[in-house]
Image (tube, grey):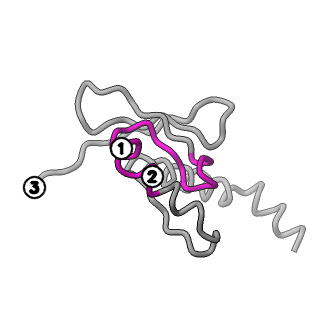
């Protein structure tokens, strides 16, 4: 069996929705991913996004928000997964749970 190498997602200090995401290719620089770009679709510096997906994202942006189809490369997906994991972990913290219970 072939397993995908561990991909590192590194948050950019002070920027909640921007990350560096490793390339799967050895020796490549990590790609900058901005999850806030294109109204939340995200943007990546990888060739796949810049060459193949950005024009599709721009076309989708002209549609009403509830009819858009996300156009995301694997680096955007990995950054989103990383951020969601961190947010869910924070929501499980005792301090957050206590605050939620007091408010509800």
48 in magenta:
yes
Closer to the chain start, of discs 3 and 1, is 3
**In the rendered image, which quarter is residue 71 located in?**
bottom left
Q: Residue at x 62, y 74 (%)?
A: 66
Sort mark 1 into few (<14), some (14-19) or many (20+) by Cα contacts within 10 Å.
few
Percent position of residue 51, x then y: 36, 43
Q: Nearer the viewer, mark 3 or mark 1?
A: 1
Instruction: Give the side of residue 22 with respect to residue 38, left or right.
Output: left
Q: Earlier in the sequence, mark 2 or mark 3?
A: 3
Q: Which residue is mark 1?
A: 51
Decide if residue 13 is on the left or right side of residue 101.
left
Please tell me whether mark 2 or mark 3 is closer to you in this view. Answer: 2
Measure how far apart labels 3 and 1 are at the Cα level. 31 Å
Q: Which x, y percent locates residue 40? A: 61, 55
Left or right: where 98 falls relative to 90: right
Q: Residue at x 23, y 30 (%)?
A: 26
Residue 21 percent across, percent down from the top left = 42, 38
Q: Quadrant of the N terminus?
A: bottom left
- Which residue range is magenta in the image? 35-56
Assign a secondary structure to mark 1: helix
Q: Nearer the viewer, residue 84 or 36?
A: 36
Residues at marks 2 and 3, CA–CA distance in whole angstroms: 36 Å
Q: Residue 55 — which label?
A: 2
Q: Which residue is identified by label 3?
A: 1
Q: Which quarter of the rendering shows the C terminus? A: bottom right
Discs 3, 1 touching: Cβ within 8 Å: no
Task: Name which quarter of the figure residue 34 lies in.
Answer: top right
Q: Secondary structure at mark 2?
A: helix
Residue at 40% from the left image edge and 52% from the top image edge: 53
Please report contact status of discs 2 and 3: CB closer than 8 Å, yes or no.
no
Query: Could you give the CA–CA distance between mark 2 and mark 1, rounded to whole angstroms?
Result: 8 Å
């Amino acid at each position: 069996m072939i397993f995908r190498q561990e991909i590192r997602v590194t948050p950019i200090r002070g920027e909640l929705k921007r990350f560096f995401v490793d390339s799967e290719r050895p020796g490549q620089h990590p790609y900058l991913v901005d999850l806030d770009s294109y109204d939340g679709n995200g943007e990546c510096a990888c060739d796949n996004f810049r060459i193949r997906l950005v024009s599709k994202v721009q076309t989708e942006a002209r549609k009403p928000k509830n009819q858009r189809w996300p156009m995301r490369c694997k680096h955007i997906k990995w950054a989103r997964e990383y951020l969601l994991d961190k947010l869910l972990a924070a929501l499980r913290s005792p301090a957050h749970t206590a605050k939620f219970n007091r408010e509800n």
